[in-house]
Image (tube, rainbow, N blue to C red):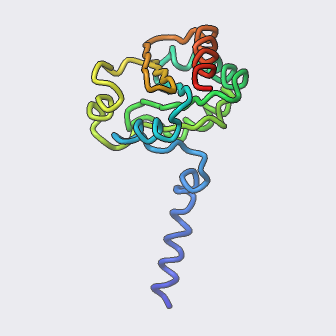
Amino acid sequence: MRLASIIVASIVAVLPLAAPALSGEGPSPFEAATLNEIRDAHKGGPLIIHFWGLTCSNCMAELSGWGAFARAHPDATVVLVNWDQRGARPEQIGPTLRKAGLSSVPSYALGKGFEEKLRFAVSPDWMGELPYTRLIAGDGTVTAFSGAADFAELGSWLAKKNQASR
C-alpha cells in the first residue's frame, strides 16, 4: 500500500509538468519524417509551411501578419514550424501564437533529432535562416523563400493554386 501511495504522489507531482503536452496546447515535434507526413495529409491542395523562431526578431515582427493572413484566408492550409534550438523555451510558443492570432494553425517545434538532418529533410538547399517559407502547390511543385513574407503575393499565389486544384 505504501508503494502505491508513493507512485500516486509521484504522478501527481509530475502531472503539472506534463500538462501542456497533455492539453494539446503545445506544438508537435518536427522530426525528419514530419514534412512528408504533412505533405501527404494535404495532397492535392496548396500548402504553406512557415519556419520561424522566438529568437528571430524578423520572425516575431511578422508573426501578427501571419495571423491576419490566416484569418483572411480561413480555407488556406498553413502550418507553422518553430525552429528554435532545443535550449529555447517551448512553453512560450503557444502563448506567442495565441497573441498573434495563430492558435488554430497547426504548429510544430524542432524535434530531438540532429538539427542538420532535420533541416536537410526540409530542403538540402536550406541553410537554416529564418524566417523561411515553403509554398507547396497541389501538384507538388515547391517554391521557397527566406525573409519576410509579402502577404498580398502569398494571397495571389494561394488563389491561383486553389483555382488550379479544382
Count every numbered label the image shows and give the total.
Answer: 0
x, y percent for residue 117: 27, 34
Q: Is residue 146 above or below residue 86?
A: above
Q: Residue furthest bottom?
A: 1
Image quadrant in which the C terminus is located: top right
Q: Nearer the viewer, residue 36 or 107?
A: 36
Q: Residue at x 51, y 14 (%)?
A: 58
Residue 128 placement (x, y as % from top left): 34, 21
Displayed quadrant of residue 35: top left
Location of residue 123 with respect to 148 vertically, above or below: below
Please state which of residues 43 and 55 is positioned toward the viewer in this rendering: 43
The location of residue 19, given as percent across then percent down, is: 58, 55
> Which residue is found at the position 43% from the left and 13% from the top?
146
Q: Is residue 133 visible?
A: yes
* 95 versus 140 height, above or below: below
Viewer-side residue, 102 vs 6? 102
Instruction: Judge left or right: residue 102 versus residue 85.
Output: right
Side (left or right) of 79 relative to 99: left
How far across and how far down the image is residue 102, in percent? 65, 31
Q: Could one spot residue 52 in this view of the protein? A: no
Looking at the image, which is closer to me, 122 or 54?
Answer: 122
Q: Which residue occupies 61% across, 31% down?
A: 96
